[in-house]
Image (cartoon, rainbow, N blue to C red):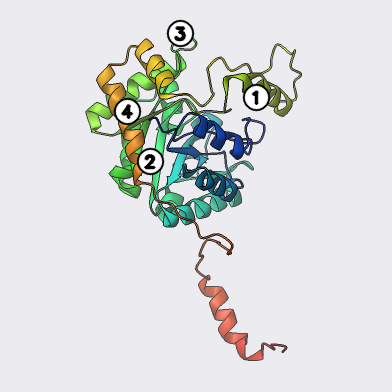
Amino acid sequence: MFTHLHGHSTFSFLEAIGKPAAIVNKAKELWMDAIAITDYNGMYWAIKFYQLAKDAGIKPIIGVELGFVMDINSQISDQQIGNIVILAKNKEGYQSLMELTSFANKEGIKGKPKIDLQALKKFWREIICLFGWANSRIGKMIALDEKESKIIEIIHLIQDTIGKDNVYLEIIAQDYNETNESKKVNELLLALAEKEQIACVVDNNYFYPSKTDKQAREVALAIKDWFKIYDENRRKPKWQFHIMTEEEIREILEHNGIDKKIINHLIETNNTIAEQITTEIELNQTLFPNYETPEDIKEIYEQYKDKLVVKE
């Protein structure tokens, strides 16, 4: 059984179609044991998704997709800003996701949520990171024909930060005939994976539950971009972004010329990651990230604590 580790709900505002309930229902319809939601820049859906998935007997995999740069304080062009997909391995990882998401929305670049390597160093705990897809940091480097040595250097830096076993390259299952973009990224990632002994996963990065939702998503994209549905300049995604079955994933990868042994290993890696995820959230209580009080605030408190008045 195939496990989707990268996908979006309607909470990726106007980029995707499908409430968490629809995604869970689709996963149940396809007899999936687990499924992930990795919406852009926020986790507003997480508790509802967790409850719905648990009730349906499906393992909820909670993640987020954030903008990622190496140094948030450096001068960066828009072309250098790619994304990173982060999954929580357990409850501690879920706390880490909240901290990273809060940092991204608080700091960011040009008003857009972003994290950098230092944020990963500060907040990472029990998380898994995926890189692939044309909009990822690695994918953008490949599209810009960056040197392979530079790409490997960045991968190694991230591995050194969160652990080699927590970093995966992501192969995207989309038809090469519809665009060469995925072909270029996938081929280099597979070569790097073999050369550097890095594990790979596979996804099609879903944006809607069923094939019939494709037009609804195009309407949402047009609204977001201030276009009308009949405007020629609006975004018209060519690829298939529904929640695919394992058979569909296999068929696309085989059509793209990827060896069956590699396909089997990719799908097996997805399922292995899903099996290792054990996120359990205690409901009906307040769960905020734990932040250390800054030293200057502690000093002020110590100075004035005796003057504080507590009313009975």
Q: Report the quarter where the C terminus lies.
A: bottom right
Residue at 49% x, 56% y is: 281
- At label 1, counting other C-alpha atoms closer than 10 Å, the crowd grade (few under 14, some 14-19, many 20 or more) is many
- Circle 2 packing at 10 Å, graded few (<14), some (14-19), many (20+), is many
Q: Mark 2 to mark 4: distance in Å? A: 13 Å
Q: Residue at x 73, y 26 (%)?
A: 223
As drawn, the label of residue 274 is 2
Indicate the amino acid at tag 1: Arg
Which tag is nearer the camera, tag 1 or tag 3?
A: 1
Residue receiving disc 3: 177
Cβ–Cβ below 8 Å for labels 2 and 1? no
Label 3 Cα crowd, 10 Å radius (few <14 / some 14-19 / many 20+): few
Mark positioned earlier in the residue sequence (4 or 1):
1
Q: Position of residue 67 (x, y in %)?
A: 52, 39
The amino acid pointed to by label 2 is: Ala
Q: Which residue is mark 1?
A: 217
| Mark 2 or 3, closer to the camera | 2
Q: Quadrant of residue 154?
A: top left
* Furthest residue in direction top, as rendered: 177
Residue 18 appears in the rendering:
yes
| Quadrant (top left/top right/bottom left/bottom right) for the N terminus | top left
* Nearer to us: label 2 or label 4: 2
Residue 144 visible in image: no
| Residue holding disc 4 | 266
Give the spatial CA distance, label 2 vs label 3.
30 Å
First along the sequence among labels 2 and 1: 1
Q: Is residue 275 or residue 110 the one in the foreground? A: 275
Calculate the distance from the C-alpha at mark 1 to the C-alpha at mark 3: 22 Å
Name the residue type under label 4.
Leu
Query: Above or below — where is 47 with respect to 148?
Result: below
**Earlier-in-chain disc, 2 versus 3:** 3
Choose the circle earlier in sequence order: 3 or 4. 3
